[in-house]
Image (cartoon, rainbow, N blue to C red):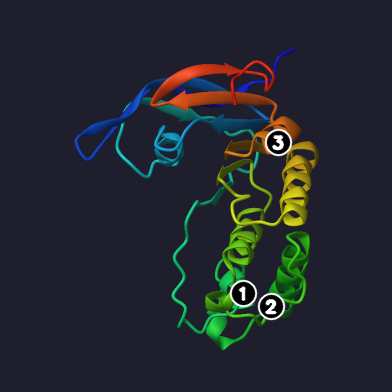
Amino acid sequence: MSKPVTIDVANVTIRRGGRIAVDGATLQITQGTIHVLVGPNGAGKSTLLSAILGQIAFTGKVDMTFRGSGVIGFVPQTFVADRTLPITCAEFLALSRQKRPACFGITKPAAALIAKLLERVGLAGFEKRRIGELSGGELRRVLIANAIDPAPEVLLCDEPAAGLDPTAAEELDKLLLGLRDEHGTTIVLVSHDREQVKRIADRVTRLEITVKATGKPDEVPL
């Protein structure tokens, strides 16, 4: 028996700056799978993620069906951090994990959870490191930690492995597979890493402004 569809993208067209960024894209993303979007730079992959999130205008239809928590996690491709901003990793992660402002201190329950999240992404002991002092790869791991708690029903990731060293990238793959297998998370991932796609993808869609192919990793040109 096939799994139900979580995200149904039907004939989505997106115009940006007077040009067509995505043209009539249609695809279905099955519940509890890792679905990877591949294609060249400028093919519309990040733009399509923005449409699924409802962040930009488009024509066509995007339906998202929730069967559990309804929590959506998102890891953006870019995140501009003010290097002078005096906020630590723990304070950043505490923003959505406690009611009182983090500037008044982090509660014990939130601190314990934050420590576990940082450990899960390979940043144990980074609680007091300032966001502005992090490398690009370290910042990306903090964003991943922020997106996986509470365990999302749907997780959208725009090139989450960019800037990660091979060990960190391998740990990220394990984390994503764990979310799928343990929590049934539906994951939509943009990736240029062919080996990563082969390791973790259940389904692959090749996008070149329009959908060129969808299938198993060995059925779609990477």
- Alpha-carbon distance for marks 3 and 1? 30 Å
The residue that label 2 is drawn on is 127
Kind of residue indicated by mark 2: Glu
- Alpha-carbon distance for marks 2 and 3? 32 Å
Nearer the observer, 194 or 88:
194
Q: Is residue 10 visible?
A: no
Q: In this rendering, which labeled residue sits more in front, label 2 or label 3?
A: 3
Q: In this rendering, which labeled residue sits more in front, label 3 or label 1?
A: 3
- CA neighbours of label 2 inside 10 A, class few (<14), some (14 to 19), many (20+): some
- CA neighbours of label 1 inside 10 A, class few (<14), some (14 to 19), many (20+): many
Q: The C terminus is located in which quarter? A: top right
- CA neighbours of label 3 inside 10 A, class few (<14), some (14 to 19), many (20+): few
- Alpha-carbon distance for marks 1 and 2? 5 Å
Nearer the observer, 53 or 134:
134
Nearer the observer, 73 or 70:
73
Q: Secondary structure at mark 1?
A: helix
Kind of residue indicated by mark 1: Cys
The residue that label 3 is drawn on is 195
Q: For residue 32, what is the image quadrant?
A: top right
Q: Secondary structure at mark 3?
A: helix
The dot on residue 179 is none
Kind of residue indicated by mark 3: Glu
Indicate the position of residue 213 as horizontal and vertical percent values.
53, 16
**Left or right: 115 with respect to 205?**
right
Q: Are marks 1 and 2 in contact (CB under 8 Å)?
A: yes
Q: Are marks 3 and 1 in contact (CB under 8 Å)?
A: no
Indicate the position of residue 112 as horizontal and vertical percent values.
76, 73
Up-down relation of residue 85 to residue 163 (above or below): below
The residue that label 1 is drawn on is 89
